Each structure stands twice: as structure tokens, then as C-alpha cells.
Amino acid sequence: MNRQTDWAEAAAPSRWLRLEFGLFFIAVPVLIAVLFPPNWMFPSLFTFTAIGIVLLHFTHGFAWAELRYSWRNWSWPEVAGFAVGMTLFCVALVRVARPEAAFFLLHNQPELLAMIWVFYPFVSALPQELLFRSLFFRRYHAILPNGRTAYLLNASLFSLAHLMYWSWIVALMTFAGGLLFTWAYRKRGSFFYAVLLHAIAGNIIFAVGLGIYFYSGNVQRPF
């Protein structure tokens, strides 16, 4: 009887964690994408982010100080190589997919692009990494699959969180980004590095013109 009681007590938190995980990382993004009008998306995302930060704060064993761990575990040549590769890929993609949007902000609204470059790392990259790296792996580690499967799950759900844009280009780019940022966070053990790569990727996307796919005003639902 004692073993059965212990098992039941251990299983209950796992059930609640799975329910919470499913609601937060699957149900909410899908509901935002399907039910909410485009002009409600960003207020909804800010609310979603605030809830996630609260959950992270109350995660057992988590301390905000750990976000500083291994923050120097990266190199300038590696970052420079990523920036160059990301730029070449994005330029090629925008030339093929939306040539009219190539470098639009740079040529027509450089002040807006400068503002995006300043604020994107703090209002977008940082909160997203808190939710999809720190919260994901710290709070829900007990119910995650092992090894690379957890990385693939993380990248898939990171891509799903961008379903609201209804774009296969956004879906593929965020999936690839999710894998990269998870590698920086898990393999390098550096939250800072994940934020840095995310910020660089996002700023390049807007600089070359692919930000057109990440603008709620351009969202066209397929239904």
C-alpha cells in the first residue's frame, strides 16, 4: 500500500505538469492563431509571456542568477560566422520569395529599423528565450523525452508558437532557430548565448526584409 501511495503522489504532479505544459505550449498558441484577430495578437503574446515568467519564477529549484551561468561560453568567430551565414541565407530567401520587400526598411525607414535593432533583443528575443529555453527545460524537465527528442520537441513547439503568422517560411525558420537556440542553451549551457543568437537572427531578418512575414498586419489566415 505504501508503494502504491508513493506512486500515486509522484504521478499526480506529473499529470498536472503535462496538463499545464499542454495548455501553455500547445493550446494557447493554437487558440491565439485561430481565434484572435491579428490586432489582438501582440497583447495576447505579452500576457502569455507574463504568465510564463511567473511560472518560471515559481519553478522549484530555479534561481534567476542561473541565467548568468556560462554566459561567456561562446566565441566571436563563431558569432561572426553565424551572422554572415544567416545574412546570406536571408538575402537569398527574400530575393526568391519576396523580392519587392528586400531591404525595404533599410532603404525607406532606416530610423524604424534602428529602433527594431535596439529593442528587439530585449522585448522579443529575451522573453522568448525565457519561455522556450529556461521555462521549457527547467520547469518541465521531468516530463520531457530524453536527448535529441527533447530538442526536436522544443523546436516544434517554438515553431507552433509562431503559427499566428500562418506562413510556412516562418514555420521553417523558427523550427531551425529553435534547434540552434536550444543547442546554445543546453550544449553550451549559456542562456546569454541563446539570447544573443536569437537577437542577431531577428535583427538580420528585419534588416533584409523578411520581417514582412513577422508583421501581424500582413497575416492572412487560410480560412
Image (cartoon, grey):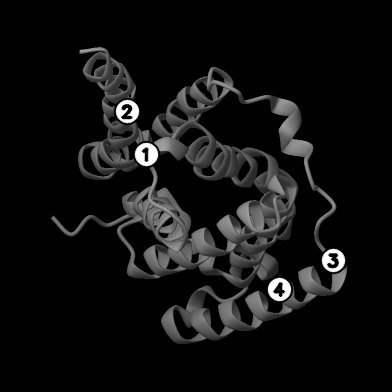
- Give the number of the mark in front: 1 or 3: 1
Instruction: Please report whichever mark, 1 or 2, sits nearer to the chain's N-terminal start.
Output: 2
Query: Residue 171 in the image: x percent, y percent?
Result: 38, 63
Residue at position x 50%, y 44% from top? 132
Does the CB distance between marks 4 and 2 fall below 8 Å? no
Q: Secondary structure at mark 3?
A: loop
Residue at position x 26%, y 13% from top? 2
Whole-Å distance between the Cαs marked 4 and 2?
A: 38 Å
Q: Residues within 10 Å of mark 2 (few under 14, many from 20)?
A: some
Instruction: Please report whichever mark, 3 or 2, sits nearer to the chain's N-terminal start.
Output: 2
Does the CB distance between marks 1 and 2 fall below 8 Å? yes
Task: Give the residue pinned by disc 3.
Answer: 75
So how many labels did they put on this image?
4
Instruction: Please report whichever mark, 1 or 3, sits nearer to the chain's N-terminal start.
Output: 3
Whole-Å distance between the Cαs marked 1 and 3?
A: 33 Å
Instruction: Please report whichever mark, 4 or 1, sits nearer to the chain's N-terminal start.
Output: 4
Task: Give the residue pinned by disc 2.
Answer: 14
The three-letter amino acid code for the residue at tag 3 is: Ser
Whole-Å distance between the Cαs marked 3 and 2?
A: 39 Å
Whole-Å distance between the Cαs marked 4 and 3?
A: 11 Å
Q: Residues within 10 Å of mark 1 (few under 14, many from 20)?
A: some
Whole-Å distance between the Cαs marked 1 and 2?
A: 7 Å
- Give the number of the mark in front: 3 or 2: 2
Q: Quadrant of the N terminus?
A: top left
Mark number, residue 143: 1
Q: Secondary structure at mark 1?
A: helix
Task: Give the residue pinned by disc 4.
Answer: 82
